[in-house]
Amino acid sequence: MTGATLLLEVSGLHIAFGGREVVHGISFSVGVGEKLALVGESGSGKTVSALSLLGLVQGASVRGQAVLQGGDQVGESVDLLALPEQALQAIRGQDIAMIFQEPMTALNPLFTIGDQIAEVLQQKMGLARAECAQKAIKLIADTGIEEPERRAKAYPHQLSGGQRQRAMIAMALACKPKLLLADEPTTALDVTVRRQILDLLTDLQRKHGMAVVLITHDLNLVRQFADRVAVMEDGRIVEQGAVDAVFANPQHGYTRRLIASKPRRDVVGPGVGAEALVQGQAVRVSYPVPRPGLRGWFSKGEFVAVTGADFEVAAGQTLGVIGESGSGKSTLALATLGLLPFGGDLRVFASTWGQGVSQDRALRKAVQVVFQDPFSSLSPRMTVEEIVVEGLQVHAPELDALVRRQRVQAALLDVGLDEAQFSGLLQRYPHQFSGGQRQRIAIARALIVQPRVLVLDEPTSALDVTMAQQVLQLLQRLQKERGLAYLLITHDVEVIRAMAHRVIVMQRGQIVESGPVEEVMQRPQDTYTRTLLAASE
């Protein structure tokens, strides 16, 4: 740290679980008003290091020092790691606040956003209930959420991902903390919302003069936001310094690998005259919504999520679908999977959904899906074998147990998982794997029934840069070997550049631009496409 008054100094931080040390004596400091980024892959120890400062790591043995200047009174220094729980409780939210990675799980689904922010004000500042409610609305307004009075009465599920993240920021800043710990604050947000959240944090940081520790695997985010960066690998800080200096001249091999870990394009085009496996013309998807007032008792309104969508996916081809949250891209994917009713003409292998149970079952075998978050899409109560074999039990019930197990092992080997690498692989559970490994299991589950089309719904958004690169390389290899068609839903422009042959850009339920990926990415015609591309830089 240079040029800033010291706010927090962490030295010799060790963290262990059950006698196994996961953080090995790291040291770093944060100055008043400074922005420090902790960067590393999943499992590097960056999140657990930040959580340990507030005593939020259950079952951990923590030692070392974390000295906060002016913790209880102006000018007083306190060692966070030596404080009793009651004293630490007073610091949480007041002096140090935290934005957690996934606001949908961090926010209480049973209380409105306004009530949750007001609770912080009431507990920490002892304000009257009415005053808390008014301050909560102002905090919501300060984070850029439109109609703050109405949104204060909304529950978390009634807000978009970006709005939930803004609500988390409002809650964290309620008591004007000196230090903000932001754990992956933009993960799984689309590029324009990500830029908005980043700009918001920058503005609020300057306005309140607070320091920020940003925990992330997004190197572009670090470049745009942080003053200094500390790179973590396997529980150790291997390099730290000013952002410009580290990115321009990384000294450690691991830092160089992280910086080089961008999605790489390694695809071949579909053959001449490749069969069109999925075709959509004037596809329309709508949802019933309640009408306000008495009319809602007698009839429902309509929200049109997708309208007039024309698209085609051929064998061996990847069609990328990009757009902001709420643009209709995931709705289009669900319609393609036959999971939502639709209007217009949508054909899969020249057939349409809803023509009978046996025909739909045949289509479901040929069209499989890989979801965004493997941790939530894989059952925590099922073993790897039970998860992967499930498709065979439905689509090939005539196979005996031995053949099914052999096919499960072959599917896992195809995605780079085997018994030699993971002892007892088939009997393990999802939580015993990393994010990238869980996504490989999800791909194996889809591949085991030998589909011809894979719908990929944000397959790398929950992964760090190196794991994302590995998963994309796996998908590219499988496409070349099997001639798979991919319908790729993503908000990541770099993933589109690496994977797609053609791309469609969606905004508010409509396709505003489409064409070969090189043409759309290099010479965008629509203003919205240009905005998306600019936000990703």
Image (cartoon, helix red, strand yellow):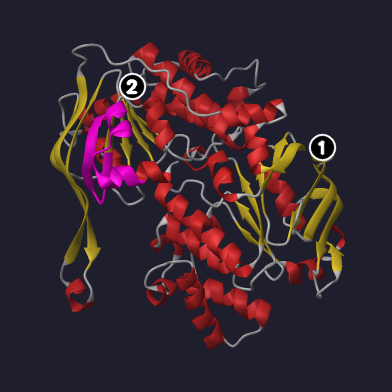
Residue interval drawn in magenta: 505-531
Mark 2 falls on what kind of element? loop
Horizontal side, residue 298 vs residue 477: left or right:
left
Point out the residue furthest to the front here.
Answer: 3
Q: Is residue 246 above or below residue 363?
A: below
Amino acid at circle 2:
Pro
Q: Which residue is mark 2?
A: 451
Residue at 36%, 44% (x, y): give it.
Answer: 532
280 and 398: which one is in front?
Answer: 280
Q: Is residue 206 above or below residue 429?
A: below
The answer to if 509 sits in the magenta stretch is: yes
Q: Would you call the spot at circle 2 few (<14 residues within 10 Å), some (14-19), or many (20 or more)?
A: some
Q: Is residue 43 above or below residue 401?
A: below
Horizontal side, residue 502 vs residue 190: left or right:
left
- Quadrant of residue 6 within the rendered picture: bottom right
Q: Are marks 1 and 2 in contact (CB under 8 Å)?
A: no
121 and 496: which one is in front?
Answer: 496
Residue 78: x and y, percent? Answer: 85, 65
Residue 495: x and y, percent? Answer: 42, 32
- Quadrant of residue 317 within the rendered picture: top left
Mark 1 falls on what kind of element? strand
User: Mark 1 and mark 2: span between their CA atoms?
Assistant: 42 Å
Q: Is residue 41 visible?
A: no
Q: Which residue is mark 1?
A: 20
